Amino acid sequence: MKAKLLKKKLKNNETGLLDFVDSFGIDFDVTDRLVALPSSDPNVERVRVSPPGMDATNEGLNHLIVKVVATHSGKIINGRVYPPDKVSSAVDSWTDPYKRPVLRNHNDDDDPIGRVIDAEYVDMSDDIEDVSEVPYTKGGLGHILLTLDISDPDAIQKILDGRYFTVSQRLSTNSLVCSVCDSDWIKGDYCEHESNKFYDGERCYFKAGDISYKEISFVNIPADDVAFIQTIGGDSEDSEILGFYSNQDLMVDLLSSDRVNLFDSDRGKTILSKLDMSVPDIKKTKSKKENDKEENYMSVKDKTKKAADAAKDVKDKVEIPAEEKYTSKAFQEAIDALSREKQDLVDQLEAAKKELADKTEQNTVLVDENANLSTSLRKSLADRLVDLKMALDKPDARAIETAEDRSALVDTYIERSMDSLQDAIDDLLLERLDKEMGVKDKEDDKGVDFNDDSKIEDDSLAQDEKTKDQKDSEKEEPVVLSKKDSVLNGLFGKKKNQ
């Protein structure tokens, strides 16, 4: 990334924030990463992810709960250091104001494959008396441990077979300070120092300010070499990979050999609460209206059965041997009374049958109405999603020129579940709000907002459209610009894993 381009981005910034992605880019597909490389973190032992006998194709496996080491404090990552106090203070941003998405390769135009349901900061600086005197170590001074709920079937399978293993996070910061001279680049105070070079025996790095985390992605080449799924195994709750079969009320630790059902345990209930579920919610998945309909239906069936049984009892009672019939007037009266009782029960039976038929018909009508309502709701959500994509100029909405084009795009989204549509809408609404707030506050803050080198390069193409006079003016200081090119290449350039 050119220093000239960063300077222009900083001048045009309206957010006062700088976004970082801690990965080197996705250049190829890793198809067999079942065993991790040795870790520089002594507290983490990595073993095979894929447990024997378990497969994501098992019917009902619709949630995979995994824990990942997302990022480290006090460690040089791409020429940057995230201070422990800033990282620990930013833990809540993973779940507040909403649960951050789990993505593939930082692609925020695609549907999320899951959500972050819990986050905690793990302090690793116990052996250091004064952390302020040790800004960084090789293994870091602490890390963020995330609990992820993966609900995408394809992603579940790739985690189980080891293709998805390493992760990278995206964050925003409001400060980027040179460790050599304390220049804050986000505030426009540029210096000539380069990250990872040594000045007077001290390694140069850039220290981040306040942090807000945006998302976590599965990537092939993370800048933080120990950001990965934590799979120690055994009974530790910090290392579990839970398979949740919600339709079967089954939750098991896939790294454990005993396969105990944790659904009703305290451990299982804790996970369900983080998923915004509870045991009664899972065991009674039907709506109140559906339960009421079923109770009414069963009540009529019970009445019908009772009437039929009673009629049979009366019939048995009035079957009197021929030789004993009409032996007395009292006996005849008893027979007449039983006959009337029988007729009453027969009438009740017929009434119950009619009520059953009516309830069955009502049940059919309600089922049809429920199906129509579900279709209508998905159509409404799909319309809303397409309108937001058009307003935000998303790639799949740019080709819309006619009402027929829009209708065709809406039809492609109608088949999704309502939860999937609502999640996509929520993310787009937040994106639109961020843009609106950025325009409102543009005179209060100065900075830059970018995700990775590819988006910066897109902006550089726009800069090439300048007039000839503007280009000539930029060439007046070739020596200074060349130096800043070198600084930014050291700070944000892609690096190859050793």
Image (cartoon, rainbow, N blue to C red):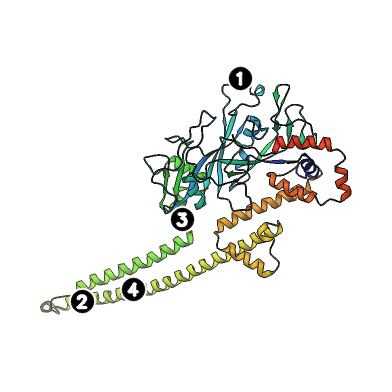
Disc assigned to residue 321: none
Rendered view: 460 above or below 304 = above
Which residue corresponds to mark 4? 348
Looking at the image, is mark 4 or mark 1 earlier in the sequence? 1
From the viewer's side, name the closer residue of 259 and 277.
259
Which residue corresponds to mark 2? 335
Q: Of circles 4 and 1, which is in front?
A: 1
Amino acid identity at mark 4: Gln
Residue 240 in the image: x percent, y percent?
46, 39
Q: Of circles 2 and 3, which is in front?
A: 3
Looking at the image, is mark 2 or mark 4 earlier in the sequence? 2
Disc assigned to residue 285: 3
**Which residue is drawn at the image coordinates 49% and 69% (left, top)?**
368
**Which residue is drawn at the image coordinates 85% and 42% (left, top)?**
475
Tell me the quadrant of the picture where the C terminus can be found: top right
Looking at the image, is mark 2 or mark 3 earlier in the sequence? 3
From the viewer's side, name the closer residue of 173 and 92.
173
Is there a contact, CB below 8 Å, between mark 2 and mark 1? no
Q: CA distance from mark 2 to mark 3?
A: 52 Å
Amino acid identity at mark 2: Ile
Provide the secondary structure element on which disc 3 rests.
loop
Q: Is residue 334 left or right of residue 402?
A: left
